[in-house]
C-alpha cells in the first residue's frame, strides 16, 4: 500500500504549546501535502512541500521533508483551541496525480 | 469563485438501493477525484477523472461502483445495490490541469455522508 502512516494517532496539548505530527510514506514522491479536517467537515489544504525542498513555513506552520527517510513533520507553534482537528499528510507519487493519504493525527488543544 | 460543490450532503439508502453522489468542480478545474473516508480513518483514493475520461480507477471497487465526468454537468459517483459497508463519507476534489502552473493542490468539497440502513 502506498498509504502513509502518521504518528501519533492522537495528541492532546495545552493552548500555547507546540504540536508536532509526523508522517512516513513508502514511494518516491513528487510532493507531500498536509491537510486539516474539522470533525464532520471536508479537508482544507494547509501546505505543500516539493520533493526537492527540505523545509517550508506558512504562518504558524512549519513542515519538513526528509526524502531519504521518506518522512515529513508538521509543527504547529503557539497552538490555539481552534487548531483542534485531524491532520492528514498526503503524497503525490512521481508520475501520478492522485493523493495518497496518511491515517491522520487527531489533535486536541485544551484551552 | 465558488468552491467544490457536492450534493447531497447527507444521503440515506436502504440495502440494495442505488446511491448517486454529485460533484461540481471549481470553475476552471478539469480534474476530479473521488475519495472515501470510513469513520476514524484517512481518505482512500477511488478514482481520477477528466472530462469524459477515466484516468485512474485503481482505487474503485470492481463491482457496483462507477464514476463519470460528462462534458456537461457534474461528476457522478454511482453505487449500485448498496450494502452497509458502503456507509462512509465520500469526498470529491478538483484541481486545475497539470502543467498549468498548478502545484497538484486539490480543493475538496464538503463531502457526502452516505448511510446505508
Image (spheres, coloured by chain):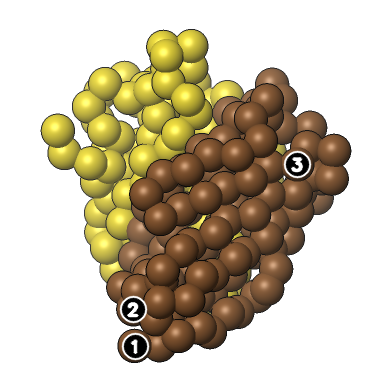
Chain colours: A brown, B yellow
Label 1, label 2: how far apart the Cα atoms are? 6 Å
Of residue B5 and residue A56, the one placed in the foreground of this image is: A56
Percent x, y of residue A49: 57, 36
Of residue B3 and residue A53, the one placed in the foreground of this image is: A53
Could you say whether the residue bearing mark 2 is in a helix, strand or loop? Answer: helix
Percent x, y of residue B17: 43, 66
> Residue at (40%, 88%) from the top-left corner?
A110
Badge 2 or badge 3: first in the primary sequence:
3
> Residue beneath label 1, please?
A111
Q: In this view, does A5 lie above or below A18?
A: above
Could you say whether the residue bearing mark 1 is in a helix, strand or loop? Answer: loop
Q: Find out whether the residues at labels 1 and 2 contact each other: C-beta distance under 8 Å.
A: yes
Label 3, label 1: how far apart the Cα atoms are? 33 Å
> Residue beneath label 3, please?
A66
Q: Residues within 10 Å of mark 1 (few under 14, many from 20)?
A: few
> Residue at (64%, 45%) from the top-left corner?
A64
> Residue at (48%, 25%) from the top-left corner?
B103
> Residue beneath label 2, please?
A81
Instruction: Work out whether disc 1 and disc 2 sit on a shared chain.
Output: yes
Amino acid at each position: 500500500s502506498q498509504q502513509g502512516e502518521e504518528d501519533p494517532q492522537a495528541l492532546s496539548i495545552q493552548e500555547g504549546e507546540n504540536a508536532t505530527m509526523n508522517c512516513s510514506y513508502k514511494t518516491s514522491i513528487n510532493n507531500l501535502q498536509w491537510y486539516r479536517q474539522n470533525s464532520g467537515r471536508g479537508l482544507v489544504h494547509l501546505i505543500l512541500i516539493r520533493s526537492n525542498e527540505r523545509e517550508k513555513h506558512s504562518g504558524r506552520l512549519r513542515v519538513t521533508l526528509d526524502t531519504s527517510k521518506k518522512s515529513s513533520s508538521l509543527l504547529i507553534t503557539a497552538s490555539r483551541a481552534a487548531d483542534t482537528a485531524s491532520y492528514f499528510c498526503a503524497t503525490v507519487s512521481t508520475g501520478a496525480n492522485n493523493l495518497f493519504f496518511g491515517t491522520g493525527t487527531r489533535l486536541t488543544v485544551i484551552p | 469563485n465558488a468552491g467544490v460543490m457536492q450534493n447531497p450532503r447527507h444521503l440515506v439508502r436502504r440495502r440494495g438501493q442505488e446511491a448517486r453522489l454529485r460533484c461540481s468542480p471549481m470553475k476552471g478545474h478539469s480534474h476530479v477525484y473521488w475519495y472515501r473516508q470510513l469513520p476514524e480513518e484517512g481518505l482512500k483514493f477511488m478514482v481520477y477523472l477528466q472530462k469524459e475520461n477515466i484516468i485512474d480507477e485503481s482505487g474503485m471497487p470492481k463491482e457496483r461502483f462507477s464514476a463519470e465526468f460528462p462534458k456537461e454537468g457534474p461528476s457522478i459517483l454511482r453505487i449500485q445495490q448498496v450494502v452497509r459497508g458502503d456507509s462512509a463519507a465520500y469526498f470529491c476534489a478538483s484541481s486545475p490541469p497539470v502543467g498549468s502552473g498548478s502545484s497538484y493542490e486539490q480543493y475538496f468539497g464538503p463531502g457526502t455522508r452516505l448511510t446505508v440502513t
